[in-house]
Image (cartoon, rainbow, N blue to C red):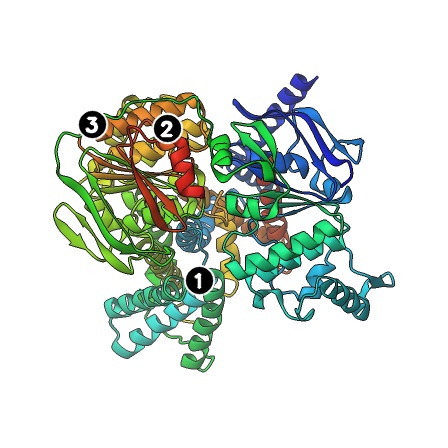
Amino acid sequence: MSGPVVVLGHIEKRYGGIQALRDVSLSIRKGEIHALVGENGAGKSTLIKVLTGVVQRDGGRILLDGQVCALESPVQARAMGISTIYQEVNLFPQLSVMQNLVFGHEPVRGKLGFLRVREIRAMATELLNRFGLDIDPQAPISGLGLGQKRIIEILKAISLDARVLIMDEATTGMSQAEIDTLFDIVRDLKNKHVTVLYVSHHLEEVFELADRVSVLRDGALVQTLDIEQTSVEDLSRAIVGRDVEQVYISAHDISGDAVALDVSELQAPKMREPISFQVREGEILGITGVIGSGKTEIGRALFGVDPITGGSIEILGRMFTALTPQKARDLGIALIPEERKTQGVFSLLSIANNIIMVNMKRVLSNKVFLSSQKRRKLGQEAIDLYQISPKNCDIPVRNLSGGNQQKVAIAKWLMAKPKVIVLDEPTRGIDVGAKVEIRRLIIEQAKQGVGVVYLTSEFKEVLGICHRIIVLKKGKIAGILPGQDAKLDEIAALALG
Amino acid sequence: MRNTLDTNQSWSSKILEMLSGELGLLIILVLLVVGFTFASEYFLTSRNLLNITRQVSINFIVAVGMTFLLLLGEIDLSVGSTAALVGIVTASIMTATSSFTLAILGGLSAGAVVGLIISIGVVYGRVQSFIVTLAMMGIARGVGYVWTHGYPISGLPMRFGVLGAGYVGSIPVSSIVALAVFAVAYVILNKTKHGLYIRAIGSNPEAARLSAIKITRYRITGFVATGLLAGLGGLLITSRLLSAQPTAAMGMEIDVIAAAILGGATLTGGIGTIHGTALGALIIGVISNGLNLLGVSPFYQPIVKGLIILFAIVVKQRSK
């Protein structure tokens, strides 16, 4: 092992009012596999973006091989030898393996740019052989499995003389066999003195692969440890923190025993395992797990967005084995979707028009015509009730802050007085103040007897608000914890372990 | 330094924003009218102005359907072919039965059926409307050719000409039809749930689905309404000529899409107004009429129209 290849010194990054990275100092040694772990929102993605020039840091400096470098653009980062493998595959599916491998630096002949096909094939074959891979260089990418695609991406980075390879959740969706092959390649890279920054949710992968591990929490570096000197338990604890500052709002008592929603052996196309749970009237049920653990799919199936392929949902004493969003709405189910901008609000439309979207009956006169008076009234009512700012209901939603847009997305459904509310990441990407308001709002609904399903991949979000917490791992229920005394490290151990 | 730059930018962008809206269109229209008035003594006569409104009417009627589709994030390239086909169906029924009611109802139904077929391709076949209607553009035109063997169906009763060429007082009947279409479309788009849902689906189809809106229903009605309105346009053309031509309304889609886009609609959905489209259709109509009066060769006219569309789009892009 030789000295550090990448040194980050006192890196700072703010997005508006949110401090995404604070005083992060980290050094990565040449030829090591350095794992980066942390919860969602801990700052891993931002750190990668800073390192790859996608976003500009607000403070601090970066040294590459002892040289200070600006890293102002992804192109510059690439030129410095930093390549990234993302969760999504970034290859051209219609082009062949060899065309993808040389893309951007194809050997050409003459000014017209005729491709030197023989040379390209030789380069690709040599690269594939170097890693002992049995892949036809002329096969189209679209015919390869996910694992092979990721490996081709790595080879592409190598062919660009990458010295630092960043892998961001690069095993998402891969089978164990594929992961094993990928890890062999990564270890091989290490022998070839390529430095790997390995970002992952899966601690078992980290322990299998990494030499050292750095933990980020709330935008700050907690510690960097030698992998041999730590354990899964210690690492989980470091990731979630013991004394996380928390917006605690103690969960109220549930008045009755009535069941609001009974989900039994529910299955949908994107759910890996059938799932069963109950939500009582007035109960807030948290469902959490790392990204990809299946919580969003549960929400979509409950609202009939994805078709139910097995099992049933019982609501208001009636059993359903098929559901459409219209049916779900009529039964009193509401879904506040994960992506605010693309799923939750109509950003071109005014606050009032967003609110009436699921409350049409209340603003129609003669069942056909929209009454602008009633529309205004309903819009204003929502604004007052849920403290949406600005107070003018004619303003297009795209002019609102993230927190207020989210309030509109939620208020729209609350005005319809649902019996069961499914919220997917309701507090993602909004500031602390808005977060508290939205949590209060959810509790208010539960106190009125509404059954709440609270889906989130940020473990600490389910604390202090839920009566029970279901922890998912790979689509299965890994454990159910009582909301009152659940601890972050318990959740983390179930979800990550 | 930064501040002064910002204020400068907001000044120019404010002006651009105003000009790219309906006010800008109105200014362009007024400028065109003033310009042509000076250029030709015939332009600002009541006879010519009424002539313009009659010419604009058909384009506008079809452009209303197009505006609905653009708002939904869809498009229909087959409107010209549909208009011609509806003319042929109407004329055939009329010569066979000599019943006006049957002929008109039959013709309009044919337009609606074309729209329905398109919507099935888009909604259930999951093919982009650009592709489906490109195919329908050829199919509807071809059916018209096969039906008529390429010959016009002429000799329709004089009385049928009232729709396309007649006047009530001094106002063309087709302009009255256009005004009625304007009123109905305006009310639907601005005063009903249907209109709001159309806008919502175009601006964010995923959010619309998650708001429990039956997207397919609104897509289907959008295409059917456009087929119906293209048919109404074809009916008026046939009535004015007292003859159904299989080659009628060639290239109509260009003027119609141009009117809607000029009026503020976008190809990405969610944006567009009926009064904007009306102004767009008027501008295109005034340009055609003015160029005719000035004796500009009809060969040059599509070039002028094309340049105007490009200009309008560039101004709109800049204002963003």
Locate residue A194, reporting x and y percent. 73, 47
* Residue A117 in the image: above or below residue B67: below
Nearest to the observer: residue B99 or residue A486: A486
Q: Residues within 10 Å of mark 3 (few under 14, many from 20)?
A: some
Chain letter for mark 2: A
Q: Nearer the viewer, mark 2 or mark 1?
A: 2
Q: Residue at x 18, y 41 (%)?
A: A260
Give me the C-alpha separation between circle 2 and circle 1: 36 Å
**Residue at numbered disc 1:** B79
The 10 Å Cα crowd at callout 1, few under 14, some 14 to 19, many 20 or more, is many
Q: Same chain, marks 2 and 1?
A: no
Residue A150 position within the rendered picture, expressed as x and y whole percent measured from the top left: 61, 56
- Secondary structure at badge 2 equals loop
Which residue is label 3 attached to?
A447
Instruction: Depth check: give the residue in front, A203 or A403.
Output: A203
The one nearer the camera, A407 or A42, is: A42
Judge whether residue B245 can be spotted in this image: no
Q: Pointer 3 and pointer 1: residues touching (CB < 8 Å)?
A: no
Circle 1 chain: B
Query: What x and y, as percent, mark residue A50?
Result: 65, 34
Report helix, strand or loop for mark 1.
helix
